[in-house]
Amino acid sequence: MARAPGESGKSKWVEYSSVGLMFPASIIVGFFIGHFLDQWLNTGPWLTLVFILYGIAAGFTNLFSQARRREPKK
């Protein structure tokens, strides 16, 4: 795959590792938001589960947008 002008191997490595870190980070943030709201509103595990699902969806959205950005142009 041809590199764009000014793009080094390190920048690609940083971009891919950021995707690898953003996926679990979005799930963890969703967990903590849901857990905080569950304690505050006394709603049991329901908001934690909902926000974990939102975190998973955000992680996949980020993953797909990064993959689409790296796709070669036709």
Image (cartoon, rainbow, N blue to C red):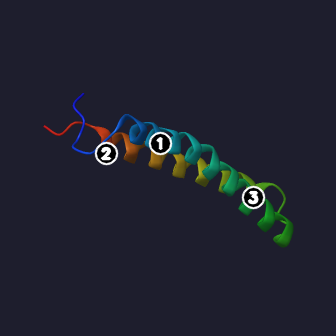
The residue where tag 2 is placed is: 69
Total number of numbered labels?
3
**Separation (CA) of disc 2 from disc 1:** 15 Å
Please tell me in which quadrant of the rendered image residue 6 appears.
top left
Residue 38 lies left or right of residue 19; in this view the side is right
1 versus 13 height, above or below: above
Q: From the top left corner, tell me how far across and down residue 66 is, in percent.
A: 39, 45
Spot the residue most to the top: 1
Reading the image, the residue beneath label 1 is: 14
Q: Secondary structure at mark 1?
A: helix
The residue that appears at 79% across and 59% down in the rendered structure is 35
* Mark 2, secondary structure of its residue: helix
- Using the numbered discs, state the Cα–Cα distance from disc 3 to disc 2 in whole angstroms: 30 Å
Instruction: Judge the density around disc 1: few (<14), some (14-19), many (≥20) Cα neighbours within 10 Å.
Output: few
Q: Which label sits on residue 41?
A: none
Is tag 2's residue or tag 1's residue first in the polypeptide sequence? 1
Give the mark toward the camera: 3 or 2: 2
What type is the residue that disc 2 sits on?
Arg
Residue 19 in the image: x percent, y percent? 50, 43
Residue at the spot x=72%, y=63% of the render? 33
Q: Nearer the viewer, mark 2 or mark 1?
A: 1
Q: Residue at x 17, y 40 (%)?
A: 73
What residue did someone put label 3 on?
32
Whether label 3 touches label 1, CB < 8 Å: no
Instruction: Please give left or right for residue 31 compared with residue 60 in the image.
Output: right
Q: Residue at x 55, y 39 (%)?
A: 20
Counting from the top left corner in percent of width and height, residue 74 is at 13, 37
Residues at discs 2 and 1 in contact (Cβ within 8 Å): no
Can you tell which of label 3 and label 1 is closer to the viewer? 1
